[in-house]
Image (tube, rainbow, N blue to C red):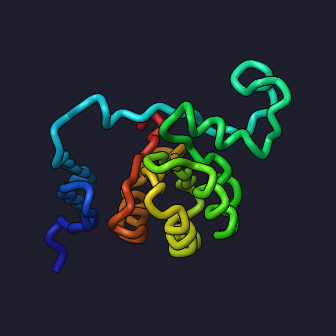
């Protein structure tokens, strides 16, 4: 029977939340309760990548080999967006190589374009290769609001993943 409500979020170990979709009115209610006290130490600053030769000299010292960019970057920032995953999905081995260059506590925030919803299971499996360095998955939604797409993403991705929605459309 259609009640007008459907639960579509399973909450991960790092968050407590409840989410309901009210089908009759088209509204979405998402409540997230942080289990820890708010502190500045929970704020991470990073950029949308680290592999920019134009940052040398400047951020990277003159003569720094591009293969050393990530290790240098990770000594100065706690996180980085994996912008490349928004265009193509690197191999599991590549994710392992990146984690080997990053110190404990560093987090990678992979990007998932909301218009690429095929193979979400493969995306989730590859993200697991980042291990304890997996940060929030940034889901970029450029089109008009689509509650069905959001429900599909939330219902298809591993519920233990931390998700960050980038809602770029004014709707």
Which image quarter holds the N terminus?
Answer: bottom left
Q: Is residue 57 visible?
A: yes
Q: Position of residue 19 (x, y in %)?
A: 21, 57
Q: Residue at x 33, y 67 (%)?
A: 159
Which image quarter holds the C terminus?
Answer: top left
Quick one: 28 or 50, which is closer to the camera? Answer: 50
Q: Position of residue 169 (x, y in %)?
A: 48, 37
Q: Is residue 90 left or right of residue 5?
A: right
Quick one: 21 or 3, which is closer to the camera? Answer: 21
Q: Position of residue 110 (x, y in %)?
A: 54, 52
Q: Residue at x 20, y 34 (%)?
A: 38
The residue at the far top in this view is 58
Q: Is residue 5 left or right of residue 70?
A: left
Q: Residue at x 62, y 62 (%)?
A: 95
> Which quadrant of the figure has residue 90?
bottom right
Q: Residue at x 59, y 61 (%)?
A: 116
Q: How many marks?
A: 0
Q: Is residue 22 visible?
A: no
> Which quadrant of the figure has residue 49?
top right
The residue at the far bottom in this view is 1
Q: Is residue 40 left or right of residue 79?
A: left
Q: Position of residue 62 (x, y in %)?
A: 82, 24
Quick one: 98 or 81, which is closer to the camera? Answer: 98
The residue at the far right in this view is 63
- In the image, residue 17 above or below residue 2: above
- In the image, residue 37 above or below residue 87: above
């Amino acid at each position: 029977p259609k009640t007008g409500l459907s639960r579509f979020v399973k909450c991960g170990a790092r968050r407590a939340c409840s989410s309901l979709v009210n089908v009759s009115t088209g509204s979405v209610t998402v409540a997230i309760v942080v289990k820890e006290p708010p502190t500045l130490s929970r704020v991470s600053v990073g950029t949308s990548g680290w592999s920019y030769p134009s940052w040398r000299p400047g951020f990277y010292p003159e003569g720094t080999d591009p293969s050393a960019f990530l290790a240098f970057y990770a000594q100065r920032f706690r996180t980085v967006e994996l912008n490349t995953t928004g265009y193509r999905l690197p191999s599991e081995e590549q994710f392992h190589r990146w984690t080997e260059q990053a110190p404990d506590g560093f987090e990678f925030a992979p990007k998932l374009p909301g218009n690429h919803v095929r193979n979400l299971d493969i995306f989730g499996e590859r993200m697991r290769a980042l291990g304890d360095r997996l940060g929030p998955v940034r889901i970029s939604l450029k089109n008009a609001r689509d509650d069905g797409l959001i429900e599909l993403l939330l219902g298809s991705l591993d519920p233990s993943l931390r998700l960050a929605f980038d809602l770029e459309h004014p709707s």
